Amino acid sequence: MKNIARTFVVVLIALGALLAYTGTFTVDEREKVLVVRFGEIKRAENEPGLYFKMPILDDLVYVEDRVLLFESRDKPVQVIDSRRYLVDTITMYRIVDPKRFRESVQASLTRAEDRMDTRLEAALKATYGKRTFEAALSIERATMMREIRDQLIPQARDLGIELIDVRIRRTDLLPEVLKSTYDRMSAERLAEAEQIRAVGNERRLTIRAQADRQAIVLVSEAKRDGEIIRGQGDGERNRLFADAFSQDQEFFAFYRSMQAYAKSLKGEGTTLILNPDSEFFEFFGTGKFKSRSTSE
């Protein structure tokens, strides 16, 4: 009898321990828990702590309470000028309504991300389709990301999800059009370089023509001024010679002859063949200047 009572107590203890184990659960700060009985959501526990449930009858569905990320790669888009690109995005979201999340996608993150990814592709096409590729690389990039996020928010809300942000990580050309685009950009740069070179040559020719014209003008003016000064100098020289000639004609004739001798007999080995009675030898020997000097 004692053995039966002891066994009964052990069974009760084991049963109590089993009920305590299967009838309690904990929720930590990284998750939320749905208590489901026969497929029906009975309640949601959103705060960390220890909770009770009906053993065997109740099932638990754990839902992430952290900020989650999913990447969307190589989404094809076409901009307003018909060029096509591949876009990569990162979406940040948090599950804020576990009940709706369970009802809409069976609490499956994969299903939720697939549905958001489909809507994201449509939002990317709509947003890029209104702009050029240059706009996607400019300050409009932030505006585009806000537009994409706003288009996703209604569907995310229907899934019990709060959409935090959508970021465009990469925008690249399709491989098949990358080469043609590069060739076109190279041709545009070459054409621009030729245009700049043509403008530079035109300016060079203009500047050179102006410089040549200015040089001609300056040289002409310098020659004119030089001739004027030379004429003035010759006139002054002739005036001085005339004054000297009027004061002493014989001395002036002697001076001019000395200059003629100096120029004619310049250098070594100079030979002159002249008549001894030539006027050139007027002041050699017993010429006029000698007799005049003696008389004086």
Image (tube, rainbow, N blue to C red):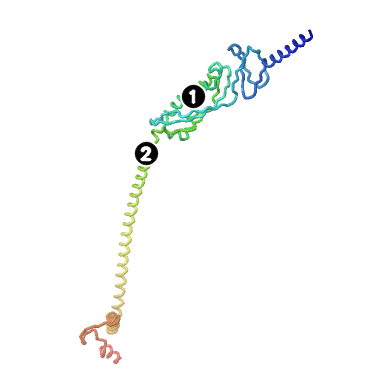
Residue projecting furthest to the bottom: 294
- Can you see residue 89? yes
Image quarter (top left, top right, bottom left or bottom right) of the C terminus: bottom left
- What amino acid does circle 1 point to? Asp
Question: What residue is at 32 percent from the left and 57 percent from the top?
Answer: 212
- Can you see residue 252? no
**Residue 141 screen position, x and y as percent:** 48, 32
**Residue 208 screen position, x and y as percent:** 33, 54
Of residues 269 and 222, the one nearer the viewer is: 269
Of residues 286 and 236, the one nearer the viewer is: 286
Question: What residue is at 57 percent from the left and 22 percent from the top?
Answer: 95
User: Dot 1: what SS?
Assistant: helix
Q: Is residue 147 left or right of residue 52?
A: left
Question: What residue is at 53 percent from the left and 19 percent from the top?
Answer: 159
Q: Is residue 179 above or below residue 46?
A: below
Q: Is residue 220 above or below residue 76?
A: below
- What amino acid does circle 2 point to? Asp
Of residues 258 and 288, the one nearer the viewer is: 258
Q: Which mark is residue 238?
A: none
| Callouts 1 and 2 close, C-beta under 8 Å | no
**Residue 92 screen position, x and y as percent:** 54, 27
Image quarter (top left, top right, bottom left or bottom right) of the N terminus: top right
User: Dot 2: what SS?
Assistant: helix
Q: Mark 2 = which residue?
A: 183
The CA distance from mark 1 to mark 2 is: 34 Å
Q: Earlier in the sequence, mark 1 or mark 2?
A: 1
Location of residue 65 by image quarter: top right
Q: Which mark is residue 117?
A: 1
Q: Is residue 252 left or right of residue 95?
A: left
Location of residue 99 by image quarter: top right
Location of residue 191 by image quarter: top left
